Structure formats: structure tokens, C-alpha cells
Amino acid sequence: MTSDSALLQRHHPQLFKSFFQGSFPCSTACRTPGKRLDMVISSGHDMLLEKDYAALAAQRLYTARDGARWHLIEKVPGHYDWSSFLPMVQAAKQHEMQIIWELAHFGYPDHLTVWKTSFIEHFARFARAMAEVMRNEGITQPFFTPVNQISFWSWAGADVAWFNPHVTNRGKELKRQLVRATLAAIQSIREIYPDARFVLTDPLVQIASDPRNPDSKPYADAQHQAQFEAWDMLAGRIDSELGGNESCLDIIGLNYYPDNHWFFPGEPMPETHPLRQPLHRLLAQCWQRYQRPLLLAETGAEGESRASWLQHVSEEVKLALDQGIGIEGISLYPVVEYPAWADDRRSPGALFGLGDPNGNRTLHEALALVLRSQQIKFQARCQGE
């Protein structure tokens, strides 16, 4: 039996429609100038909306992350074509899916320059117009992610030039600009939906100093702390001139994978290394720092590791919940398969495979079994058994 004091300490998630969730791949990054990804298309999700939402609901995943594709909606400056978005809203509504809508997942319209003030102005108007469309469709109590993974985008796009805006040594500048855009979008959406909720995503990582190089510790510590910069900016705790405040820091979305641990400056940390911090301790760091609801917004492993990874993550999350850490959900990414955005290979870590010629996706049975067993355990746990 569990003691009464332990039951009182436990956190009982209740924010989302389902604790276990699915994240659809929806990046629209430009890997090279003129070569844009659209992972909604490459995964087949655009053609299989009805089936995809129904398939998630059949697996008791009633909450999902999905994306509006800004580059399609605002091809012409100031003019919005909602033909790519409305079917998503309507299909989700039909299948009673709760969607956390992303507005910018590494992509933006070709006519905009991310460094200019006009980028923020366009994004704020787009956010408001999108909220109006959703309100007109009868959507209540909405969730949004204005800019997906501000810190990762800043590094990938403006430090190492993996994708747009394809520059180096300007990561901090891009981070500040994306924070400004996020704050402007939050304000615009709240004009339409005062009760809107915002999931603010970034990677959850551990960066440790290499034991063979103790002099690296200050640099490793600084890099580890840098993962919190965007959230601190949004809350106005640092760089207050950007306009952040605590009311803008809502739900902390954490993206966590097996390789999110490394030694400074970049050597991977083996899973069995004694310095590797377990997930529940990393979650505790975020909880102690922000005291905001936490969502594992993306997690998954490739190949045959995907089932055991979900088992591991679920057990770590149980430990966190038992310690009173306010984690509200675990979202599987990718929930449907896609050709990986980095190198066009298939990404074999999904719950559902690519669609066949009849539009049917194969369910990964081992992952589905672990998912169902964990859903049962979490349900029993929430009922106090």
C-alpha cells in the first residue's frame, strides 16, 4: 500500500485530454536555399488526415501536436489561404482530437526575412488570423506552440547553418528574434482566446564536463545552463528589453531523446556512463526552476529500441510524478513515419508506418503493446491503486 503522505505528494496530471500523446512531423525548414521540406506531405499526413486522427484515437492518444504551414497559408504578404489548414482543424474536430497547434516549425514564407521587424509583425498578424479561423470553427480551449524549439532553431539555423536562415555565429541574435516573435504571437492569440494555453518547446539536455578534461567544467556548465535561455527570455528573467514576462511562460515542452546527453564540447555520453543524469532528475531541474506544467513534447528512439525506450521514459516519468513534479504528458515522436529531414532516409521510430497505396499505415506492434500497458498503469495510478 502507498502511504497517504506519498499520495499527497504525487502529481496527478489533468491538463490534457490524454496523458500519452502523439506528435506529427511537420517541419517546413529549408535545408538549402530553395529546397523546402514539408513533412506533412512527406509523411503522407496531408492525404491521410482522417485516418491518422482516427488511428491515434483508436490507440487512446486523444491529444496530438500538429502544425499549420505558414509558408503555404501566407504565400502572398498579408493574404491568407487556409485551404491547407481548415481540413486539419475539421478532421481533428470530427475525431474529437485535442491538438497543440504549431505556427512555425523551422519555416516561414519565402517573402520574409527573419532578421527584420516585419517578420515579427507578419507573424503576429498570422497568429491572430489563425486564432480567428479556429474560433470560427468552434474550437474552444486551444493550445498553441508559436515557435517550435527556439534554442535548437537558433543553433541549427544561425550557428551551424544546417537550415534557414543558413548563417553562422548569429545564434543568440536569432534566439532573441524568435523570442520577440513568440511574445508577439502570444499577445495576438490572447486577443482572440484570452484562455489560450501555450506549449513552449526546446530540447531537454545534459551537458557535462569530460572527466579527462576537468578544465572544461565551467564551459560545460555554461552550455548546460544555456538550454534555459529562451524560456528565461520569454519570462522576462533575462533580456527584459525583449518584452518577456512571467505570464508568457506557460507550459514547458521538453524534447528528449537517447542522445540528449553529451560531454563538452560534443562527445556523446554512453547510456551506461555513471555521470549520465536520469530523466527524472533533468525534469526536476526544470520543475524547480520554473514551477510550470511540463510536457515531454517529443520522445522516441529508432528501430527496435522504440518500445524499450518508451518503457524507460514512462518509468522515469512515474518517478518524477511521485516526487510531485508537474509533468502532464508524454508525446511520441514521430507518431507516423516520414523520410528523415536531415538525409532523406526513412525514420523507423514511429508508432505508425508510411501509408501503403490504399492509405493504410502499419502499426508497430511492440511499441503499441508497451504504450497500452503504460496507459493501463498510468490510469490505475491516477485512480490511486
Image: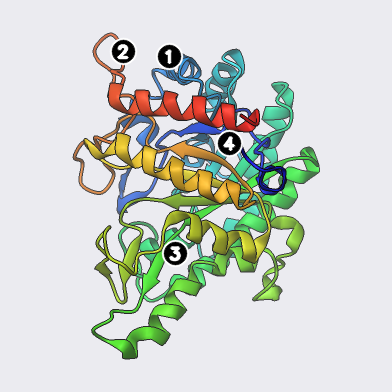
Q: CA distance from mark 2 to mark 4?
A: 24 Å
Q: Determine which residue is flagged by label 1.
A: 51
**Tag in front: 4 or 3:** 4
Q: Are circles 4 and 3 on residues that touch, CB within 8 Å?
A: no
Q: Mark 2 = which residue? A: 360
Look at the numbered discs 2 and 4 and tell me whether their residues touch, using CB distance below 8 Å.
Answer: no
Inter-mark Cα distance, 2 to 3: 37 Å
The quarter holding residue 49 reads top left
Looking at the rendered structure, the kind of residue marked 4 is: Ile
The residue beneath circle 4 is 100
Tell me what residue is drawn at x 24 percent, y 15 percent.
356
The residue positioned 29% from the left and 26% from the top of the image is 366
Q: Assess disc 1: are there few (<14), some (14-19) or many (≥20) residues with their C-alpha within 10 Å of its C-alpha.
A: some
Provide the secondary structure element on which disc 4 rests. Answer: strand
Q: CA distance from mark 2 to mark 1?
A: 8 Å
What amino acid is labelled 1 in the image?
Lys
Task: Estimate the x, y position of residue 336 in percent, counting from the top left.
Answer: 35, 28
Which quadrant of the figure contains the C terminus?
Answer: top right
Residue 77 vertical placement versus 93 (above, below): below
The residue identified by callout 3 is 154
Q: CA distance from mark 4 to mark 3?
A: 22 Å
* Amino acid residing under circle 3: Ser
Mark 4 residue crowding within 10 angstroms, few (<14) / some (14–19) / many (20+): many
Q: Nearer the viewer, residue 278 or 8?
A: 8
